[in-house]
Amino acid sequence: MISQSKWQIAPVDSEAWILAQELNLPHEIATILVNRGLRTASQAAFFLYGGLNDLYNPFLMRGMQEAADRILRAIQKKEKMVVFGDYDVDGILSVVMLVKALRSLGGQVEYFIPERMKDGYGLKAHHLPRILEIKPNLLITVDCGIKGFDFIRQAKEKGLEVIITDHHHPEERLPEALAVLNPMLESSGYPESYLAGVGVVFKLIQALFLRLGVNQDLSHYLKLASIGTVADVAELKGENRILVKEGLKMLAETKTLGLKSLLDGTGLNNRKINETDLGFRLGPRINAAGRLGMTEVALQLFFSDSPEECNSLVKKLNELNSTRQRIEEKILKEAVEKIEKGSLQQKYRLLILGSENWHRGVLGVVASRIKEMFYRPVILFAYEDGKAYGSGRSIPEFSLIELINECRDLTLNFGGHKQAIGCTLNYDRLPDFKEKVNSLASSRITQDLLEKKLPIDCQLDFTSITPSFLEFFTRLLPFGAGNPRPVFMAREVDILNQPVTFQGRHLKFWLRQSGRVLEGIAWEKARIWPGLRRGDCLDLAYSLQVGTYRGRQQLNLILEDLRPHQS
């Protein structure tokens, strides 16, 4: 029974005691807040209690004034607009939100999302002829466009004005658009830089309604923004946190036909919905349509006013999601076999694999799973028509986008974030790409980086898990990127019964410390911890799962790691 990770216990910080006294918090809760960088009473109070009234004025964002004015002029003059989006959850829901908002204001608006397999990601010059067939006066991008230089230059020549709304990292120069809304710009002037695409669109919708003096109900847009923000793994701090927290409250009361049908079809209607439901039940179904080249199925669901059609579309999304899962499992199996057969995890600090038989629409998900299995950055490629289409995922402490940026001369295009990238290159450049990437990785990825770490917030004995503590603990929700679920440590804990394996993969058993007994669940640990026995005395790293069962609060310990207790 060996610990799977290096435990990193946060040092005791005196500011946590001060914060606990100022806000009358349990010390452990104050410690978690300080560990998240929330050191002052005002920062912590905003985090715990912030709501819709605390959202920033959208006009603080550079370009918002110009964008709102131009869109409202287009609505007034009955000009045709096109919303151009991406094919992932963030992009699809951004399109739905903006199109619905513009139509509610009387706008004449169509939408266009490229086909993942045929068109690839982003605003490309080859999309322009199809856009011009619609004869628009104004095009608005959502969740993309910040690198659409050629498209925007050619659109300008054709008399088509473009507004960009995006949240991806920009180049050193910006496209010559009418307005660029991107909180990632150093010059954006906006207090929040980590909004997802849906977050930027929400701010634009907010600005349009404010400019018109319309007291519009924003609840439908909040619901969609909450799903898109979580699905895009945006940091759940500041406004993102408010959008998700408030959206979650409203989702259970959904009346809009398409979204209600999706909730019904995933077993989520008429119950409290949490961020895990967004990330692992709703998001993947919407994403499956885009990943498998059938984005229109998801879009039509949100625009349909027919109950029968909505039910049929949800059924189709469920089928697509099942297909996606089967494809992912097949690729995962083949990739792991390649890695283990060639002992690649022992030879390379960054894994690069590819096949002409792999579906490029799901490579990112598979790369993420392999990254966790072997704990190192991974780039997977699908080979098609003389090109290699890649998707990569990285470990927390290593920026993959910075590494790929140094190999840009070998790519046709690339983009992404610190921990997730996409790139395309000619297949014949792949050997050079591998050589350069592996050379850079071997010099920058140290052995310490490849050692999996488990950050632990503080020690929390079973007796300290009181109703008062749990009340404050639930105020830390929702958990996700930027606000990870807190991990606690408990020492000298006894296993009371022989651990039970369920579903062939998981463990469940009762634990006792200082007379208090709680149930522990260890997801995916049956094969890793086969030697656990009744009577073992352990130190635990665990998180808390607080739920409701038959009207009563239910508390479980989720076991992240363990080790034999040493007195």
Image: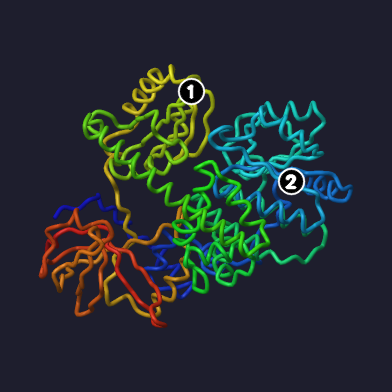
**Quadrant (top left, top right, bottom left, bottom right) of the C terminus:** bottom left
At 74% from the left and 40% from the top, the residue drawn is: 139
At 24% from the left and 28% from the top, the residue drawn is: 347
In the figure, is residue 521 to the left or right of 563? right
Indicate the amino acid at tag 2.
Glu
525 vs 5, nearest the viewer: 525
Mark found first going from the N terminus, 2 or 1? 2
At 20% from the left and 70% from the top, the residue drawn is: 509
Task: Report the Cα–Cα distance between label 2 and label 1.
Answer: 32 Å
In the figure, is residue 336 to the left or right of 71? left
Indicate the amino acid at tag 1.
Asp
Q: Residues within 10 Å of mark 1 (few under 14, many from 20)?
A: few
Q: Is residue 498 visible?
A: yes
Question: Which residue position holds label 1?
Answer: 385
| Camera-nearest label, 2 or 1 | 1
Asked if disc 2 and disc 1 are in contact, CB closer than 8 Å, the reply is no
- From the top left corner, tell me how far across and down residue 80 is, in percent: 81, 44
In the figure, is residue 467 to the left or right of 60? left
- From the top left corner, tell me how far across and down residue 144 is, in percent: 62, 39
At 20% from the left and 58% from the top, the residue drawn is: 526
Q: Residues within 10 Å of mark 2 (few under 14, many from 20)?
A: some
- From the top left corner, tell me how far across and down residue 403 is, in percent: 43, 29
Question: Which residue position holds label 2?
Answer: 110
- From the top left corner, tell me how far across and down residue 523 is, in percent: 28, 60
Residue furthest bottom in the image: 551
Colouring style: rainbow
Q: Quadrant of residue 483?
A: bottom left
| Element at label 1 | loop
In the figure, is residue 487 to the left or right of 70? left
